[in-house]
């Protein structure tokens, strides 16, 4: 392998694969991609219904949070993809852009170029939308997006149940108006997963100006003064250093980009000193501002043994709602699954079929942090999302669970509904529901915000995603979101990387 490239990109995840594709499109630019995980060869990655089998497998970093007071002291499992495609190779393939207000907020916070009107072209450019080109959607982009899948009877009944309890039908939650309940778009093409490795990376791997290494765990950013000059990585037990003539770009995700900055001396000085790390740049926001989506559910036995249709996937319905009409965007997202999905599936009953209507808290007030456990790059960092630290977060989630139970008890589901097995026991009041949430809520896998963009004291990158106070070093991944989006975070992360590629190439 050559030792000098124009760009060295760390991490082949949702963002990293996009950058590799777009930056290496200029044949005069040499790009090196370093990915800690292995190639994306497992069947479970590519067959959507096998997705639960990826959890705690050899393509999962399998992180855990510290005990969460708000979750009755439980430690929460945080899967993260460790393979080509990163978390887009192990995620649930739901394709949700978020609310226009989310991006307008980023711009309002002082981030020029990130408003909805400015981001919409990137969402269109990345798509090859099943429904074709329109004001809202793109055609011919790298990422195939399916809008509808064959619905079975149970899924139809779940939608009817939601309509019965007051949701409008919404046939396209990615076309401006999020509220209502309707089809959940998926990054699935002809029954196989469209990770960013499949859509952006594999098609360009034969470019001569692109080198991609797997099993290459980056342990350190190298500097001359304040300028990033390359990275050190460990592969097959050997340590090597490569140089970046133009830039080092961290796309290692909301946990590992933080860990790499901290290991390299960029972060809160007191934390670095505690681990004997030389402070290069006392940047207090590194690892702070951690936001995640917490989900709480009801669950029902599914009776009547309804057939699963050919091509049917197991969660095909989503919807959004505001608990207060004065809110600028929905604060709850719903998923209506025609399977059990109880605590990552680990608490599913061993026998019988089920349905799980669930509610996700979209805009938590609670903020957590990621810190180092030690200066050893192979030690997992300390993850503290600080779930439900704000009472308002619990209140909203309880409202969400009430709605999922209304759906679960609707007449439209009468034919299929068996016993309610979540919440457990007799629910008599809000206190019981609060306890249910604290006892059973889980992450829906969307940590963001730990290297937030902005120009305040706690910002880590500027609005061109350059690390404050450093040269030739960017972060491009979900960690740069100043505030979490109203929905699943894969599509927003891809759009961030699309825009970053234009910024880096001077095209924006
Ligand atoms: C189980 C699960 C289900 C999800 N479901 C959905 C969903 O249905 N829809 C949705 O929109 N979002 C979903 N998400 C969230 C979404 O996938 C993520 O927000 C998104 O993939 C984050 O992209 P990223 O580029 O920030 O990081 P990642 O995609 O996680 O990429 C980071 C990459 O960096 C690599 N890396 C890390 N450290 C190093 C290092 N030191 N050296 C080299 N490489 C390194 C990792 O191995 C990984 O490949 C889910 C996530 C998970 C885990």
Image (cartoon, rainbow, N blue to C red):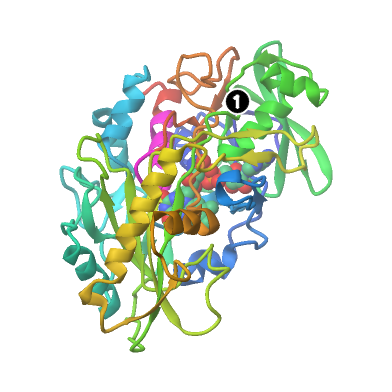
Image height of 435 relative to 28, above or below: below
Is residue 487 covered in magenta?
yes
Query: What's drawn in magenta, residue-wise?
Result: 485-501
- Quarter holding the C terminus is top left
User: Which residue: 70% across, 34% down?
Assistant: 2
Res. 89 visible in picture: no
**Considering the numbered disc 1 on the image, is that residue within a helix, a strand or a loop?**
loop
Residue 102 at x, y percent in the picture = 32, 34
**Quick one: label 1, few (<14), some, or many (20+) residues within 10 Å?**
many
Residue 137 falls left or right of residue 80: left
Q: Main secondary structure of the magenta part?
A: helix
Is residue 484 covered in magenta?
no
Res. 237 visible in picture: yes
Taking depth in this image into account, of 275 and 395 the one nearest to the observer is 395
Image height of 222 relative to 430, above or below: above
Image height of 256 relative to 200, above or below: above
Examine the image and state in which quarter residue 326 appears. Answer: top left
Residue 121 falls left or right of residue 458: left
User: Which residue: 53% across, 73% down?
Assistant: 348
**Residue extending furthest bottom?**
304
Residue 24 at x, y percent in the picture = 49, 36
Q: Which residue is mark 1?
A: 286
**Residue extending furthest front?**
428
């Amino acid at each position: 392998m050559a030792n000098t490239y124009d760009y060295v990109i760390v991490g082949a995840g949702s963002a990293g694969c996009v950058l590799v594709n777009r930056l290496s499109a200029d044949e005069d630019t040499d790009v090196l991609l370093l990915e800690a995980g292995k190639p994306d060869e497992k069947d479970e990655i590519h067959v959507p219904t096998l997705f639960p089998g990826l959890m705690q497998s050899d393509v999962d970093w399998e992180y855990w949070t510290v005990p969460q007071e708000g979750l009755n002291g439980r430690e929460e499992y945080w899967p993260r993809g460790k393979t080509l495609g990163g978390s887009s190779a192990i995620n649930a393939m739901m394709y949700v852009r978020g609310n226009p207000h989310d991006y307008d907020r980023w711009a309002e916070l002082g981030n020029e170029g990130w408003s909805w009107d400015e981001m919409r072209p990137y969402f269109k450019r990345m798509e090859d939308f099943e429904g074709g080109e329109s004001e809202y959607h793109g055609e011919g982009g790298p990422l195939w997006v399916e809008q509808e899948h064959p619905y079975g009877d149970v899924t139809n009944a779940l939608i009817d149940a939601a309509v019965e309890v007051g949701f409008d039908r919404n046939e396209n939650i990615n076309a401006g108006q999020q509220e209502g309940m309707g089809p959940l778009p998926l990054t699935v093409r002809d029954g196989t997963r469209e990770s960013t490795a499949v859509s952006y990376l594999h098609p360009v791997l034969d470019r001569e100006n692109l080198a991609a290494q797997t099993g290459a765990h980056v342990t350190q950013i190298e500097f001359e003064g304040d300028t990033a000059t390359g990275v050190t990585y460990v592969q097959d037990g050997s340590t090597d250093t490569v140089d970046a003539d133009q830039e080092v770009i961290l796309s290692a995700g909301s946990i590992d980009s933080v860990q790499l900055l901290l290991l390299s001396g960029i972060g809160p000085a007191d934390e670095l000193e505690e681990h004997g790390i030389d402070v290069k740049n006392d940047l207090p926001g590194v690892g702070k501002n951690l936001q995640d989506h917490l989900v709480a559910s009801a669950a029902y036995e599914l009776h009547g043994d309804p057939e699963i249709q050919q091509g049917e996937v197991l969660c095909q319905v989503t919807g959004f709602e505001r608990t207060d009409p004065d809110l600028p965007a929905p604060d709850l997202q719903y998923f209506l699954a025609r399977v059990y999905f109880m605590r990552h599936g680990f608490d599913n009953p061993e026998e019988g079929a089920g349905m799980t209507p669930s509610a996700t808290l979209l805009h938590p007030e609670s903020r957590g942090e990621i810190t180092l456990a030690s200066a050893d790059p192979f030690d997992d960092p300390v993850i503290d999302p600080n779930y439900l630290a704000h009472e308002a977060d619990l209140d909203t989630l309880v409202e969400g669970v009430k709605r999922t139970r209304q759906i679960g008890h609707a007449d439209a589901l009468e034919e299929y509904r068996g016993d309610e097995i979540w919440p457990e026991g007799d629910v008599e009041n809000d206190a019981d529901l609060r306890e249910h949430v604290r006892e059973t809520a889980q992450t829906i896998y969307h940590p963001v915000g730990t290297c937030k963009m902005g120009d305040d004291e706690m910002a880590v990158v500027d609005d061109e995603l350059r690390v404050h106070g450093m040269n030739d070093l960017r972060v491009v991944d979900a960690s740069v979101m100043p505030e979490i989006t109203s929905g699943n975070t894969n599509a927003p992360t891809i759009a961030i990387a699309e825009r970053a590629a234009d910024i880096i190439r001077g095209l924006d």
